[in-house]
Image: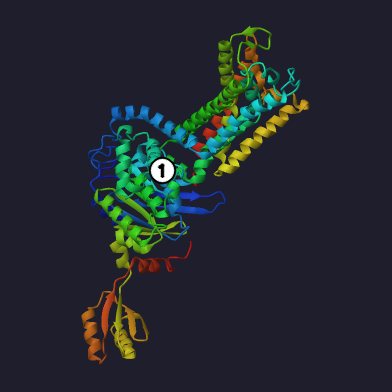
């Protein structure tokens, strides 16, 4: 029925209402293109994890539906899930088993995983996340970062078409976060679609090609990251001892939201963007001594604030 | 939202050129023999897989300290009973008139310690151990969060449940054998061994007696099938392993108390422990099978009802842990 490849994830009106009657997710229309690294953003409690659990067949939607890799979920779970690797709300491990035994256990749970290659695949997954040396240790003694890596190794036990990572850098130090990002890029370069949920905007901005923003169980926006960032206009920043003059000149040239502190003036560039070189020339011509001059690229966070009118860390 | 729609279209065009749905992952996963599209490969894999998951279950049950502790306690009971009988009845050949079944015979024949120990452990210790393992089976995985990863593996809810139940049944057998073997070893060490005098008066050879002991262990293990299913069902109701274990053991205690209240004789034949002591019928010649058969039937009924209930619960429940 579909000529072009079906999206990796496609939901229509996906809704989950919990017993209390309150909506965890409401009318979600989410489309994750194949081959994308898709950032799924939202504050804690905005419905990201509930959505992910519905996509993976752990939670039954109240209404609406989801197709994963072109198949309906949860009906086609047995065909779909072997092609999906997942890390959901932290790694869950058997503390009394070693790292290697944990992976063997999970791999044995997959009916389509070949037992003949199991040991080799487990070994490769452990090496890939840098746990080769610790694979014989009990998972109980692993640090949080090591547990997280073992969870990733589990998701990578087989080549996957889709990798669903729920807050994969939670609890990791900056070095660990960098490693995860590198891993995500590697996996994506192999053609795997990566669906990455996070409440950290810069994380999404660094690795994702696409993003969607959730707030209070509803989808606020989805699209390419570059496009989303472009939606928020850039700001001009000028460092000068002549603050009052600078403010006057910039306002004359159409900048809005001009603000100043001790020796720094910032303002939002007008649309369509004026040539900032002209602005600099105008400042100098007006006798403003410019120490530093530059534009600040709008971040996804600016975009988010612009879209929702709230800070990102405000819980839904 | 229209911007997002337009973007999705371009994103799809720029996608990795994945094959259409249903065409299989072959194009994206070169060099993987276990592609889900090849029926022969996956069929052989499936047969082996079932064993793989079952082996994994056995490993997580029997590799735990808790299981070792339970089995240790079960093994200690025959030793304690043996020592107590040895010292209590020294110089008093008649033995105690009361006490657990067959205890008076132990001093004459160590093999009777097997029967005594099974009679002592069957009302509480054995089913309690089974209740702990069965109660933990699903709730423990939910508690640790490992359930969600087994389900997305995907283990399949029905398969997982049946594998869990099979593992609990293995534990029933192992626990019974531990009691029997500990009793046999203790009996051999402390008491004489020889021909066995049955309840009905005949004397059979020691070999015959050992075979009967093995058969009795089998009947005792079968007696635990019902509580195992009950524990499995309770285990699917909650995400708390402790709550599931406590509930199962609580049900066991309640049922045992109900079974001891004479006024409730009308319902007692439907309680799962009602025919538990029927195993003694195997110590008659000829062995009487009717109560043993009724016990097996009752256990099968409990297993059918509670495994079905567990299945209905697990296959429809939202896994949020």
Q: Nearer the viewer, residue B5 or B242?
A: B242
Is residue B200 shown to the viewer in this render? yes
Q: How is the image coloured?
A: rainbow
- The crowd level at tag 1 (other Cα within 10 Å; few <14, some 14-19, many 20+) is many
- Residue lying at the far right of the rendered structure: B263
Asked if residue B139 lies left or right of residue A37, the reply is right
Image height of A59 relative to B165, above or below: below
Q: Residue at x 61, y 36 (%)?
A: B248
Tell me where residue B94 sits by quadrant. Answer: top right
- Residue lying at the far bottom of the rendered structure: A287
Image height of B147 relative to B102, above or below: below
Disc 1 chain ID: A
Image height of B164 relative to A73, above or below: above
Residue B51 pos. (x, y %)? 40, 29
Q: Residue at x 59, y 40 (%)?
A: B244
Q: Which residue is mark 1?
A: A98
Q: Residue at x 53, y 25 (%)?
A: B173
Is residue B2 shown to the viewer in this render? no
Residue A249 pos. (x, y %)? 29, 87
Total numbered labels placed on residues in the image: 1
Asked if residue B275 lies left or right of residue A300, the reply is right
Image height of A154 relative to B44, above or below: below
Tell me where residue B212 sits by quadrant. Answer: top right
Asked if residue A220 lies left or right of residue B27, the reply is right
Q: Nearer the viewer, residue B259 or B63?
A: B63
Q: Nearer the viewer, residue A67 or A244?
A: A244
The image quadrant where one finds the N terminus of chain A is top left
Residue B198 pos. (x, y %)? 66, 11
Residue A92 pos. (x, y %)? 44, 47
**Label 1 secondary element:** loop
């Amino acid at each position: 029925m579909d000529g072009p490849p079906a999206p990796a994830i496609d939901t229509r009106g996906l809704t989950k209402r919990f017993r209390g009657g309150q909506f965890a997710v409401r009318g979600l229309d989410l489309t994750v293109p194949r081959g994308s690294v898709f950032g799924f953003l939202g504050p804690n409690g905005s419905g990201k994890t509930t959505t992910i659990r519905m996509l993976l067949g752990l939670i039954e939607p109240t209404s609406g539906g989801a197709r994963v890799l072109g198949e309906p979920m949860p009906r086609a779970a047995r065909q779909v899930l072997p092609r999906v690797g997942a890390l959901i709300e932290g790694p869950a491990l058997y503390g009394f088993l070693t790292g290697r035994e944990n992976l063997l256990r999970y791999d044995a749970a997959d009916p389509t995983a070949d037992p003949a290659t199991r040991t080799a695949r487990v070994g490769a997954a452990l090496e890939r996340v840098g746990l080769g040396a610790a694979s014989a240790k009990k998972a109980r003694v692993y640090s949080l970062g090591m547990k997280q890596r073992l969870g990733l190794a589990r998701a990578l036990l087989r080549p996957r078409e889709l990798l669903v990572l729920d807050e994969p850098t939670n609890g990791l130090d900056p070095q660990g976060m960098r490693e995860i990002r590198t891993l995500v890029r590697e996996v994506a370069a192999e053609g795997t679609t990566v669906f990455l949920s996070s409440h950290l905007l810069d994380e999404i901005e660094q690795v994702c090609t696409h993003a969607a923003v959730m707030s209070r169980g509803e989808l606020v926006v989805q699209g390419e990251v570059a496009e989303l960032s472009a939606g928020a206009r850039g700001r001009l920043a000028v460092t000068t001892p002549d603050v009052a003059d600078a403010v006057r000149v910039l306002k004359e040239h159409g900048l809005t939201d001009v603000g100043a502190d001790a020796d720094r003036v910032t303002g939002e560039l007008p649309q369509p963007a004026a040539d900032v070189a002209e602005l600099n020339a105008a400042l100098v011509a007006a006798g403003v001594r410019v120490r530093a001059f530059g534009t600040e690229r709008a971040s996804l966070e600016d975009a988010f604030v612009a879209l929702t009118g709230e800070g990102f860390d405000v819980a839904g | 939202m229209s911007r997002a729609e337009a973007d999705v279209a371009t994103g799809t065009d720029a996608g990795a050129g994945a094959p259409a749905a249903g065409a299989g992952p072959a194009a994206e996963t070169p060099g993987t023999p276990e592609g889900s599209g090849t029926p022969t490969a996956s069929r052989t894999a499936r047969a082996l897989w079932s064993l793989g998951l079952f082996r994994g279950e056995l490993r997580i049950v029997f590799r735990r300290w808790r299981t070792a502790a339970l089995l240790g306690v079960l093994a200690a009971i025959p030793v304690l009973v043996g020592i107590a009988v040895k010292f209590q009845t020294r110089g008093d050949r008649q033995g105690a008139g009361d006490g657990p079944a067959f205890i008076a015979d132990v001093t004459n024949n160590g093999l009777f310690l097997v029967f005594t120990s099974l009679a002592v452990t069957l009302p509480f210790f054995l089913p309690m151990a089974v209740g702990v393992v069965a109660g933990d089976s699903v709730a423990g995985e939910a508690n640790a969060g490992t359930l969600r990863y087994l389900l997305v593996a995907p283990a399949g809810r029905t398969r997982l449940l049946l594998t869990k139940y099979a593992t609990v049944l293995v534990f029933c057998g192992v626990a019974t054998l531990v009691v029997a073997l500990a009793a046999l070893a203790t009996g051999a060490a402390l008491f004489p061994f020889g021909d066995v005098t049955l309840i009905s008066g005949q004397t059979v050879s020691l070999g015959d007696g050992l075979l009967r002991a093995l058969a009795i262990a089998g009947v005792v293990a079968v007696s635990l099938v019902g509580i195992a299913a009950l524990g499995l069902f309770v285990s699917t109701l909650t995400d708390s392993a402790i709550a599931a274990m406590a509930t199962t053991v609580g049900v066991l205690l309640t049922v045992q108390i109900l079974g001891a209240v004479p006024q409730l004789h009308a319902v007692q034949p439907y309680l799962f422990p009602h025919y538990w002591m029927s195993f003694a019928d195997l110590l008659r010649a000829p062995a009487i099978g009717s109560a043993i058969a009724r016990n097996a039937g009752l256990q099968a009924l409990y297993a059918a009802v509670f495994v079905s209930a567990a299945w209905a619960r697990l296959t429809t429940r939202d896994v949020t842990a």
